[in-house]
Image: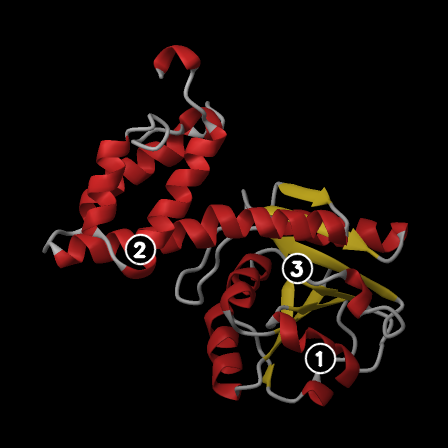
């Protein structure tokens, strides 16, 4: 892959642009907002930025569609096939978005949490790849290996399951931290107090399964503590706490000898 065009300038596109610019030529950045395209292009030393899909560089080796899931099809429909490799970066959208529109196409999904403000080092990020044919898959895997040590073939169904798992492990976990931050804030306490606990919890997963790492009052069926916590909460915090506690207890019934 000598030249790539990145269509998008948001969370995923930003880290991909930085990662790829160190290993190949990022020939152009597209964004619906020209300011954002120029901002990202300038950050990686890319010479061209555009907000016009009809002005895309015509002879790049690969075109990476790193936009919101609901506008991928719009991009594909708007630009005619030029024979290059076209791919999107979504975990939840299938490969068929390109079918009938491109001769060589695929998906390269990085399973990671991205924010435009923070450039993520991609070397250890797991990328999951699928392509229209064997030869295209070889090119797609080679592109992935430019930026990551971990590129794994996975079809659309597997990616959707991975995406569900990532929502549980990342998005929902982050929401739990948001709720915890609010609980602490109500008491005038800093969220930083939880960081050592969070780090230890995550670090344990390198040697223990999540199920074996579970601690807390729910797995002990400590109803007195659970009830006292519920009494402190209201609204959705109370319902979420109850639902998660019930889920933990259902998966970890008390041993008959402990009842």
- Mark 3 and mark 1 lie on one chain; the one further toward the N terminus is 1
Dots 2, 3 in contact, CB < 8 A: no
Q: Find disc 2 in the rendering and name its residue.
A: 237
Residue with the mark numbered 3:
92
Q: Is residue 122 visible?
A: no
What residue do we see at 14% from left, 58% from top? 186
The reply to whether dot 2 and dot 1 touch (C-beta < 8 Å) is: no
Mark 3 is surrounded, within 10 Å at the Cα level, by few (under 14), some (14 to 19) or many (20 or more) other residues, namely some
247 and 126: which one is in front? 247
Query: Comparing marks 2 and 1, which lies closer to the viewer?
Result: 2
Residue 70 in view in this figure: yes
**Which image quadrant is residue 185 in?**
bottom left
Q: Which residue is mark 1?
A: 75
Label 1: state its secondary structure: helix
Helix, strand or loop under label 3: loop
In this rendering, is residue 73 above or below 125? below
Relative placement, left or right, of 2 versus 112 is: right
List x then y, in percent, for residue 13. Answer: 56, 67
- Residue found at x 63% / y 47%: 162
């Amino acid at each position: 892959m000598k030249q790539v065009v990145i269509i998008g300038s948001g969370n995923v596109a930003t880290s991909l642009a930085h990662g790829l610019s160190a290993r190949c030529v990022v020939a152009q950045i597209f964004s619906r907002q020209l300011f954002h395209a120029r901002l990202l292009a300038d950050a990686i030393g890319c010479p061209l930025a555009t907000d016009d899909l009809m002005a895309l560089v015509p002879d790049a080796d690969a075109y990476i569609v790193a936009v919101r899931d609901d506008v991928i099809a719009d991009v594909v429909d708007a630009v005619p096939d030029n024979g290059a490799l076209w791919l999107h970066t979504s975990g939840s959208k299938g490969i068929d978005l390109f079918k009938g529109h491109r001769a060589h196409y695929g998906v390269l999904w990085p399973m990671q949490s991205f924010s435009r403000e923070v450039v993520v080092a991609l070397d250890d990020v797991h990328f999951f790849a699928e392509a229209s044919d064997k030869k295209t898959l070889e090119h797609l895997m080679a592109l992935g290996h430019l930026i990551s040590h971990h590129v794994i073939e996975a079809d659309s169904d597997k990616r959707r399951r991975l995406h569900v798992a990532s929502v549980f492990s990342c998005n929902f976990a982050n929401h739990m931290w948001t709720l915890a931050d609010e609980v602490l804030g109500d008491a005038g306490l800093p969220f930083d107090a939880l960081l050592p606990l969070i780090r230890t919890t995550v670090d344990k997963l390198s040697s223990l399964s999540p199920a074996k790492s579970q601690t807390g009052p729910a797995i002990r069926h400590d109803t007195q503590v659970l009830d006292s916590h519920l009494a402190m909460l209201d609204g959705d915090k109370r319902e979420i706490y109850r639902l998660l506690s019930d889920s933990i207890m259902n998966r970890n019934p008390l041993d008959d000898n402990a009842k």
